[in-house]
Every structure is written in structure tokens, then in C-alpha cells.
């Protein structure tokens, strides 16, 4: 009796997971429709490249060089958020091992080169949230200006065929958590 109950629960969990995976794919395909048009793809590629790190590194360096004592402290917290996020990101990528949408779905193509072969979580989104939470904590008015950039980075990763929406959502949650932990603890 109990084994029948366990089998039923497992089947129900698998069914729920299958429904979620199917929805995630549908949302990825829907957002990827923008890839049919050259102008939005060019803009999204630029936004995605900003999320590669250069923008954040320049911001951190600028804070350290011209931000005075507070700027150096914020820069140090941003570096710490990055240092804490990176091993967690790599571990999750390889532990989960989820193939990228352009590999798993013939309807989706990669509009830019992927930095690695796994999809979950989105490292661009994770780091964008971690850095912007730290920055926004200390400079809330200027930090609010980062919100559109962070949202565009996250959406660009899906629209360019590199991530599923759940990859981006997980990256956002992890990055926000790491960023908040850094400013609260340090």
C-alpha cells in the first residue's frame, strides 16, 4: 500500500515537473520570437555584452578610484559579491547540467556565442543582480537607474536563445540573495 502511494506521489511530481518544463520552453520560444528581427537582436546583443562583466568592472573600478572611502567600501562589497557568486554559479551549472535552449529546441537559435555549454542558472543575471543590489543599497537613487539595465540583461539572455526563463529567475534570486547577504553581513 505504501509503495503504491510513493509511486503515485512520484508520478504526480514528475507530471508537475513536466508541465513546468513545457511552460518554460513555451515562454522561451515566445520571447525568442524577437530574434526574427535584426534591429532588436543587435540591441539585445549589446545589452547582453554589457552583462559580460565589463560594465560592472568599470563601475567597481570607478567607485574605488573616485568614490572616496564609501566608494572603496562599496567596490569591495561588490567584489565580494562576485567572489561569492562565482563558485556557486559554476557548481550549479555543472551539477544541474541543463542544456541550453538552442541545443535542446530546434525552434531556438543562439544569436550570440554561449560562454559555456550549460544553461542553469543565468550567470549574467546572477551577477547583474548581485552587483546592482550592493550598489543600490548604498546609492539608492542611482541604483534605481540600474533596474532597466538589469531587466534588459535578463530578458536578452532568453531572447537571444541562451537561457530559459527559469534560468534567469534562478539567477536573479541567487544574485539578489548574495548581494543582500553581503550588504547585511559586511
Image: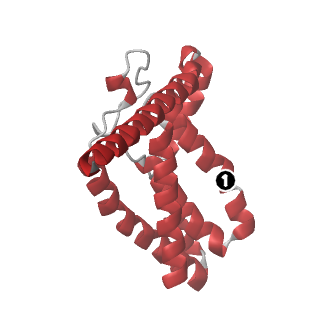
- Give the percent coordinates (x, y) of residue 93: 30, 48
Of helix, strand and loop, which one carries label 1?
Answer: helix
Q: Nearer the viewer, residue 156 or 3?
A: 3
Task: Give the residue displayed 54% in from the left and 43% down from the top.
Answer: 154
Please name the residue that numbered disc 1 is placed on.
147
Q: Residue furthest front?
A: 1
Q: Position of residue 132 (x, y in %)?
A: 58, 61
Residue 1, placed above or below residue 71 = above
- The residue drawn where x is 64% and y is 67% is 136
Quadrant of the image occupied by residue 135:
bottom right
- Residue 175 x, y percent position in the rendering: 48, 60
Circle 1 packing at 10 Å, graded few (<14), some (14-19), many (20+), is some
Residue 186 visible (yes or no): no
Residue drawn at point x = 49 percent, y = 45 percent? 168
On the image, which quarter does residue 31 sit in? top right
98 shown above or below 65:
above
Can residue 115 be seen here? The reply is yes
**Count of residue discs:** 1
Q: Residue furthest right?
A: 141
Residue 59 falls in image quadrant: bottom right
Identify the colour scheme used.
secondary structure
Picture coordinates of residue 138, whole percent (x, y)? 64, 75
Q: Residue at x 44, y 38 (%)?
A: 16
Amino acid at each position: 500500500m505504501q509503495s503504491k502511494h510513493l509511486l503515485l506521489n512520484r508520478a504526480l511530481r514528475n507530471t508537475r515537473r513536466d508541465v513546468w518544463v513545457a511552460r518554460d520552453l513555451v515562454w522561451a520560444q515566445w520571447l525568442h520570437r524577437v530574434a526574427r528581427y535584426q534591429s532588436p537582436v543587435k540591441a539585445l546583443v549589446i545589452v547582453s555584452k554589457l552583462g559580460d562583466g565589463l560594465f560592472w568592472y568599470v563601475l567597481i573600478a570607478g567607485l574605488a578610484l573616485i568614490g572616496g572611502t564609501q566608494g572603496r567600501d562599496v567596490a569591495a562589497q561588490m567584489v565580494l559579491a562576485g567572489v561569492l557568486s562565482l563558485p556557486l554559479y559554476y557548481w550549479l551549472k555543472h551539477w544541474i547540467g541543463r542544456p541550453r535552449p538552442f541545443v535542446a529546441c530546434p525552434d531556438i537559435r543562439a544569436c550570440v556565442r554561449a560562454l559555456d555549454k550549460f544553461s542553469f542558472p543565468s550567470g549574467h543575471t546572477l551577477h547583474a543582480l548581485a552587483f546592482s543590489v550592493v550598489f543600490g543599497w548604498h546609492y539608492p537613487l542611482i541604483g534605481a537607474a540600474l533596474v532597466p539595465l538589469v531587466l534588459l540583461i535578463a530578458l536578452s539572455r532568453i531572447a537571444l536563445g541562451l537561457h530559459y526563463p527559469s534560468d534567469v529567475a534562478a539567477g536573479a534570486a541567487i544574485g539578489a540573495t548574495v548581494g543582500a547577504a553581503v550588504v547585511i553581513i559586511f
